[in-house]
Image: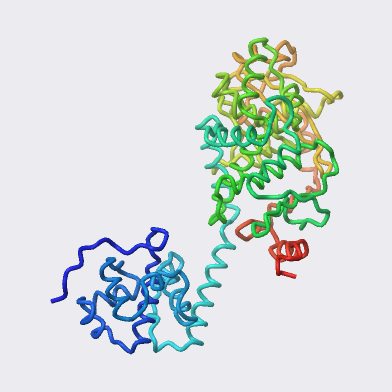
Amino acid sequence: MAARDTSAPAEGAAGEAPDLITLGRRIRHARTSRGLTLEALGERVGSAPSLLSLVENGRREPRLSLLRAIAEAVGVPVPDLLAEEPPSRRAELEIALERAQRGPIFASLRLPGIKPSQRLSMPVLEHLVGLHAELARREEEAIATPEEARRANTELRREREDRDNYLPQLEAVAEELTVKAGYAGAGALTHRTVARMAEQMGFTILHVDDLPRSARSVTDLKNGRIYLPPASIPGGHGLRSLALQAIAHRVLGHERPRSYAEFLRQRVEITYFAASCLIPQSVAVEFLTRRKREKDLAVEDFRDAFGVTHEAAAMRMTNLATVHLGIPLHFLRVGDDGALFRGYANDGLPLPRDVTGAIEGQLVCRWWAGREAFTRRDRATESYQYTDTPAGTFWDSVQTGTAADGRQFSITVGVPYAHAKWFRGRDTHVRRSSTCPDPACCQRPPADLADRWEGVAWPSARMHQQVLAALPRGAFPGVDDTDVFAFLQQHAPPDDGTR
């Protein structure tokens, strides 16, 4: 009978558990190189051939004493058996096939497995491993459908509302890194401070004018470079935010997203991190608390104090106002066609939703401040409005702007009536009434107009092509890998060995 092995499991050189499949293949390679059968090796080490077979197939971790006995029997040092690289090309293919057949993609196919034995020729192994690799690639590319994207986005928005859009761990990390990089604790975060933050993470920021069109930034992990668009606007918030978002992936330890939900979550986290750096929590809360005490809260002042866009300041208020000031609030970005582009509410505002709960693309009531702002002649400063809704009365501050494509949009920050007393503009006399989602509010034409024009009007609708387009494919949706890799090749340092 084989002796019972009661010593500890084997460990790698650094103390971590070894890769069992690779370990098993290295043991098999060493055994067969010595011309030993499983039975012969079992006699030398005092173990049953069935146990050794499990070890060689990566299904049983050997005890350290057994591993030492095997190493002595085959004449190979223990560290060599624990090495990470496969012992041969054939072993590499066998390992790849074994791993593929143990994965979820193969399990979903419900096909019988193929044992990677010596009877499989090298061409057949190459063929099988290539097919599994292509299946994995296609699975990764097809990580999103429009339906999945909306579901994932809705789930994320609900999570943010449940936690008052506040992520304390990211706040702490951002505060620590900005202080370490030399942020003085007041005013805007400078480009130089952002560059120092990148340097602390081992990266250099470079501005180029040939960035791939499908990418906002490109990070070269191999050479420690972050490529951004040209620095054409001194002090511009956008470039600082892009740099901080690229840094955030490294700070937060992100891996390649395995689903569209994970991709979206990473985007939320890096955007939050960038905002936390541009408007550090401690300074921001002190600023907002003082202004609340003075009953003079205003998004435009918050924006100007930290040198960011109105939208960034508005979103940052959603991070801090509820947790630190006790103020529930809502945020809306609305297009000039009335469609909701982005929204958040933890104050009970009834955001328009489709049957799945998604809000993106839904039309907001035409009497809400976010749409009413487009009818005003003077849009240079914030406008204010009270709106009576079935969920109560809300006060809103709105600023309009123009996007890069020339389309106009509005940014709304609002609160329930009881909290309007803390904000500048609370004394406005502008007041509207909304009964949405009742169609009679603003979706159904007035009776006299309907009587006159129903059945004799034939408008040519403006087509929104995005409703027909499939969601971009790839681990980073919409990014053209060919362009990105060619870009990195072009910009790689000469001593990199890639030219």
**101 up-or-down from 293: above or below:** below
**Quarter where residue 265 is shown:** top right
**Quarter where residue 403 is shown:** top right
Give coordinates of residue 338: x percent, y percent. 73, 36
Q: How many marks?
A: 0
Give coordinates of residue 8: x percent, y percent. 26, 61
**Which residue is nearer to you in this view: 229 or 108?**
229
Which residue: 32% across, 81% down? 74
Give coordinates of residue 47: x percent, y percent. 21, 76
Which residue: 76% across, 42% down? 239
**272 up-or-down from 38: above or below:** above
Q: Is residue 304 visible?
A: yes
**Quarter where residue 3 is shown:** bottom left
Q: As drawn, is 67 to the left or to the right of 352?
A: left
Which residue: 81% across, 27% down? 375
**Which residue is nearer to you in this view: 340 or 239?**
239
**Which residue is nearer to you in this view: 441 or 257?**
257
Which residue: 53% across, 71% down? 135
Q: Is residue 447 visible?
A: no
Q: As drawn, is 229 to the left or to the right of 220?
A: right
